[in-house]
């Protein structure tokens, strides 16, 4: 399951969005220490809906994203370091206030999304700098005792991180990969995590939520921080949440929107991490499985069960589009569109797969 942590200033709508995304009934409450509430959202996918209609299975299981929200009053980056749900998050979602509401004053006195994005980025950088400096201090002591090549390589990587952070740059912009990225994984540095800016706009700007880059300066600050951005109007989402699906769809159409802001947030978080979905289908269950892009078939089988990965023989694969167009797996097989792939086949988004495996 993908994991994302929500961050943001007070009165930004962060906790409201968490409750809407996860159907949580109560806001997280602080109990004297940094802690988070965790909830799960389903990833919207029309392909799974159509496959479910085709096979009429006993169960429909979508891909999911786990969201974490800090308890009220605790939103600074230093606090996040002590919370497992944030250390272990695959990505961070920064809820940025872009709406005016006199009854709910902004904690910094004015509405300025660009300022707030930069401020939070600075907090993440400073929090990581503390972690990096402590690690370098420890590495220095270890090097005096036993100067191994592994320690020297790690020291070099951590020094690169220190230089970037001291220069005011997040680690996600450093572009570490391969062994260098793996050496830092255990530290779960916050500014290294992919970042999605969730811009919470006012009701009168709801028509612009799909074009939030038009907010002056936002596209530039997103580029500088290495972030993606998506727009939402929390007040509108509260109204949509109270409607049945038919009325909600009509309401969205009246607003000129293709889908709800919550669905766009979930999809954007999913895509931010470079994940795709493949499907397994049948009378018992139609399910979407989350895997990183360019995952080999044998590894993808492990998303279902480790025994299937170990006993992998072949993968029967057809694209979702072809299956939906033909109407059945048998028709796809007759037309030569159901193919056999080996363990090195890179699973594509929308593949429908049956794994043949030894028991």
Image (tube, rainbow, N blue to C red):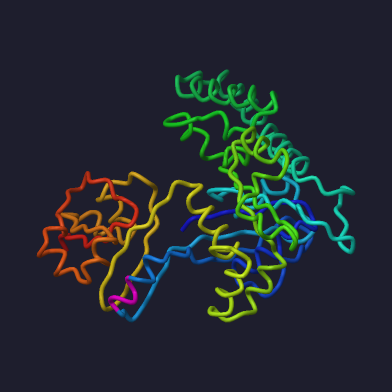
Task: Name above or below for residue 76 compared with residue 179.
Answer: below
Q: Quadrant of the C terminus?
A: bottom left
Residue 67: image quadrant is: bottom right
9 or 110, which is in the foreground?
Answer: 110
Q: Can you give x and y, in whole percent of width and height, for residue 349 in the image?
A: 34, 53
Q: Is residue 150 magenta?
A: no
279 or 322, which is in the foreground?
Answer: 322
Residue stretch rendered in magenta on the structure: 51-55
Say how many tags the image has. Answer: 0
Q: Residue at x 61, y 80 (%)?
A: 243
Residue 169: image quadrant is: top right
The answer to whether 112 appears left or right of 132 in the picture is right
Q: Residue at x 89, y 60 (%)?
A: 102
Q: Residue at x 11, y 61 (%)?
A: 335
Q: Can you give x and y, in whole percent of width and height, for residue 345 in the image?
A: 23, 46
Residue 52: image quadrant is: bottom left
Q: Main secondary structure of the magenta part?
A: helix
Q: Can you give x and y, in whole percent of width and height, for residue 7 in the image?
A: 69, 52
Task: Name above or below for residue 207 compared with residue 20.
Answer: above
Q: Can you give x and y, in whole percent of width and height, for residue 110 in the image?
A: 87, 48
């Amino acid at each position: 399951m993908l994991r994302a942590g929500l961050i943001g200033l007070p009165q930004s709508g962060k906790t409201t969005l968490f409750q809407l995304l996860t159907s949580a009934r109560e806001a997280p409450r602080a109990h004297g220490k940094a802690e988070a509430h965790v909830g799960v959202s389903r990833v919207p996918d029309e392909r799974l809906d159509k496959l479910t209609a085709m096979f009429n299975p006993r169960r429909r299981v979508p891909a999911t994203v786990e969201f974490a929200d800090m308890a009220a009053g605790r939103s600074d980056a230093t606090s996040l370091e002590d919370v497992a749900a944030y250390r272990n998050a695959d990505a961070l979602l920064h809820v940025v206030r872009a709406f005016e509401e006199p009854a709910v004053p902004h904690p910094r006195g004015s509405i300025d999304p660009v300022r707030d994005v930069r401020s939070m980025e600075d907090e993440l950088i400073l929090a990581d700098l503390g972690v990096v400096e402590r690690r370098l201090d420890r590495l220095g002591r270890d090097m005096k005792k036993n100067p191994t090549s592994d320690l020297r390589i790690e020291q070099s990587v951590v020094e690169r991180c220190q230089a970037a952070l001291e220069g005011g740059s997040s680690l996600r912009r450093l572009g570490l990969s391969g062994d260098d990225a793996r050496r830092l994984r255990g530290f779960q540095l916050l500014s290294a995590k992919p970042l999605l800016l969730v811009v919470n706009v006012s009701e009168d700007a709801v028509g612009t939520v799909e074009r939030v880059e038009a907010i002056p300066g936002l596209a530039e600050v997103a580029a500088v921080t290495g972030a993606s951005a998506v727009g939402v109007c929390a007040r509108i989402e509260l109204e949509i949440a109270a409607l049945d699906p038919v009325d909600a769809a009509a309401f969205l159409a009246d607003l000129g929107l293709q889908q709800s802001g919550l669905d766009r947030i979930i999809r954007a978080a999913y895509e931010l991490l470079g994940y795709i979905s493949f499907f397994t289908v049948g009378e018992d269950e139609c399910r979407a499985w989350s895997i990183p892009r360019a995952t080999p078939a044998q590894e993808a089988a492990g998303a279902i069960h480790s025994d299937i990965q170990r006993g992998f023989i072949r993968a029967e694969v057809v694209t979702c589009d072809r299956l939906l167009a033909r109407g059945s797996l048998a028709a796809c097989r007759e037309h030569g569109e159901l193919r056999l792939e080996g363990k090195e086949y890179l699973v594509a988004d929308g593949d429908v797969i049956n794994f043949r495996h030894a028991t």
